[in-house]
Image (cartoon, helix red, strand yellow):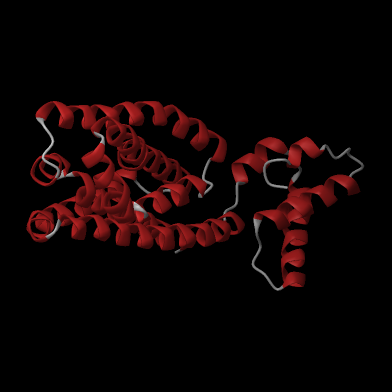
Amino acid sequence: MKTKYLYICLSGFLFAYFFAQAMSISLLAIWLKSVLHLTGAQAGMVFSANFFAAMCAQPVYGFLSDKAGLNKSVLRTIALLVLLCGFFFAFVYQPLLAVHAVAGAIVGGFYLGITFIAGSFAIESYVDRAGRKYGFEFSRVRLWGSLGFAAAAFFSGTLFNMDPRINFFLASLAGFFMLLGASSLLILAQALSDWSFDLPWLARQFRFSGGSIRNVALAAAFLAAEQGQAVAMRHLMLATKRELQKMGRLVNDQEYRKHG
């Protein structure tokens, strides 16, 4: 059941992210030409800056994702950047492009490249890792991202004709919901880490007879009962450590580094 809730939270997170992406950059070329009256060369420079910044940001996101694993710091950072979208377009990007197109392209490339281009790859990488660990398909979650983009694209043109700032601040609203989703994911991940049993790892790491396995299972159940909790991986690890001590075997802290 908790895995299902994790799937729902990630699906909602992707829906909101790609909704914000469509609201903010799907009509960027039209905004640059019709609102800011940039030339074709200037607009091309803006898009080049966006993708150059994204190219530079992707290895950084990859490094951080490898280090953080399923930590939510990358998701929270991207959600916060999306939350700032409306304010960035209205009070930074548009005035700067109007005054100095090159400076605006550089600053905008940094923000848009990191947030809406490279950011999408970082989020998809996270979802793929979570799906592999908790047993749901990446494609099913990613579908909600496509639906979010399609939902925004459906009426973004109408809103753009009214006032482009509506689109940008709707992207910020989506960022707010992304922050809520990231907070929910943090709580769920903690619950799942308590609830998940890495039995294959235990079997590889510790060689026990049938009687010792029974002792570990009973000890873990008693430990959980004393705390008024369901049996979790930490209870199994503590029971395993005690069983090894009873058997007179040396306890190597390296063996407990993953779950201890």
Of residues 247 and 82, the one drawn nearer to the viewer in this rendering: 82
In this rendering, the answer to whether 4 lies above or below 55 is below
**Quadrant in which the N terminus is drawn:** bottom left
In this rendering, the answer to whether 47 lies above or below 201 is above
Residue 158: % across, % down: 7, 58
Residue 200: % across, % down: 60, 41
Of residues 152 and 191, the one drawn nearer to the viewer in this rendering: 152
Q: To which quarter of the image does residue 101 belong?
A: top left
Q: To which quarter of the image does residue 39 belong?
A: top left
In this view, which residue lies farthest toward the bottom?
A: 228
Residue at left 41%, top 31%? 57
Q: Can residue 4 be seen in this view?
A: yes
In this rendering, the answer to whether 184 lies above or below 74 is below
Q: Can residue 144 be seen in this view?
A: no
Residue 149: % across, % down: 20, 50
Of residues 124 and 116, the one drawn nearer to the viewer in this rendering: 116
Residue at left 27%, top 30%? 102
Q: Is residue 244 left or right of residue 108?
A: right
In this view, which residue lies farthest toward the front?
A: 99
In this view, which residue lies farthest toward the right?
A: 248
Residue at left 12%, top 47%? 35
Residue 129: % across, % down: 45, 41
Q: Is residue 103 left or right of residue 200?
A: left
Of residues 52 and 102, the one drawn nearer to the viewer in this rendering: 102
Count of labels in the image: 0
